[in-house]
Image (cartoon, rainbow, N blue to C red):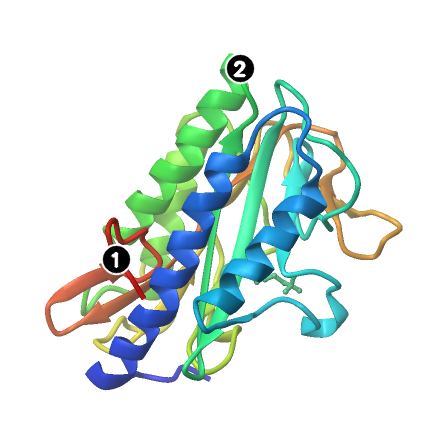
Amino acid sequence: MIVLKSEAEIAMMRESGRRVGRILMELREMIKPGVETRELDRYAEKRTLELGAVPAFKGYNGYPASLCISINEEIVHGIPSSRRLKEGDLVSLDFGVIYGGFYGDAAITVPVGEVSEEARRLMEVAERSFYRGLEQLKEGNHLSDISAAIQAEVEKAGFSVIRDFVGHGIGRELHEGPQIPNFGQPGHGPKLKKGMTLAIEPMIAAGHYEVAILSDDWTAVTRDGSLTAHFEHTVALTESGVEILTADDQGWQP
Ligand code: MF3
Ligand code: CO
């Protein structure tokens, strides 16, 4: 179900989102060779509580941690562990909180030290495709205009869009309607309206988009082992236009 939010509800989602943005930016600074992925998870959880929020993913469908950390061919839902990051890894951090009853959800992909040219390009294309999608978020457009714009940007670069995971509406639930695939023909699906709050999240692969799930029942990887990248923000279509709710708000103090 698509739930339209009032300006007051969007104001609460802004509070939730800025906490996600802040914590992700702090985590980005911690990414270096030798760091254990569970240290990042512990930090994310500690900061969430300090900022008066609750981790959104822990316990969600039984997910065991606060942060998803997906490395190289891992696309999403990588579980933090004693694994250490190493030079050249490409690391996706996907993180969400609940604050004042509202969810925020965002993801970034970060290089560990020097990464390959392909990794760098993949990261850039994931982010750029998000913004191409976001440009389509305006009243009167159809939902799939976002999907089509993301797909076009990714495929133009010679990469592929993951089909098995999608963006989503977000608010009082982590996953609300509508689903937002990162591929499709323009001009389909619901019309975009003020009050929509969406998590737009291209997940892309350097090779084929086919997915496998590891034996931990969570970690999704590319079947061909190709590198992946993920970029996500929670965004809103408001009276004054498009707003990125999970942007890091420089200088903001809770
Ligand atoms: N960020 C993911 C999403 O957008 C949620 C992670 S699923 C969880 O759907 F189980 F790890 F919480
Ligand atoms: Co999401």
User: In the displayed structure, would residue 237 be above or below residue 124?
Assistant: below
Lower position in the chain sequence, tag 2 or tag 1: 2
**Circle 1 residue:** 252
Question: Is label 1 in a helix, a strand or a loop?
Answer: loop
Q: Residues within 10 Å of mark 2 (few under 14, many from 20)?
A: few
Q: Position of residue 26 (x, y in %)?
A: 45, 45
97 or 39, which is in the foreground? 39
**Circle 2 residue:** 114
Outermost residue, right direction?
215
Disc 2 residue type? Glu
Rendered residue at 18%/69% (across/down): 139
The quarter of the picture where the C terminus appears is bottom left
Q: Position of residue 148 (x, y in %)?
A: 38, 49
Q: Does residue 228 appear left or right of residue 29 in this picture?
A: right
Q: Does residue 64 appear left or right of residue 6 in this picture?
A: right
Q: Position of residue 71 (x, y in %)?
A: 66, 35
Q: Quadrant of residue 252?
A: bottom left
Q: Is mark 1 within 8 Å of ligand 2?
A: no
Q: CA distance from mark 2 to mark 1?
A: 31 Å
Residue 188 visible (yes or no): no
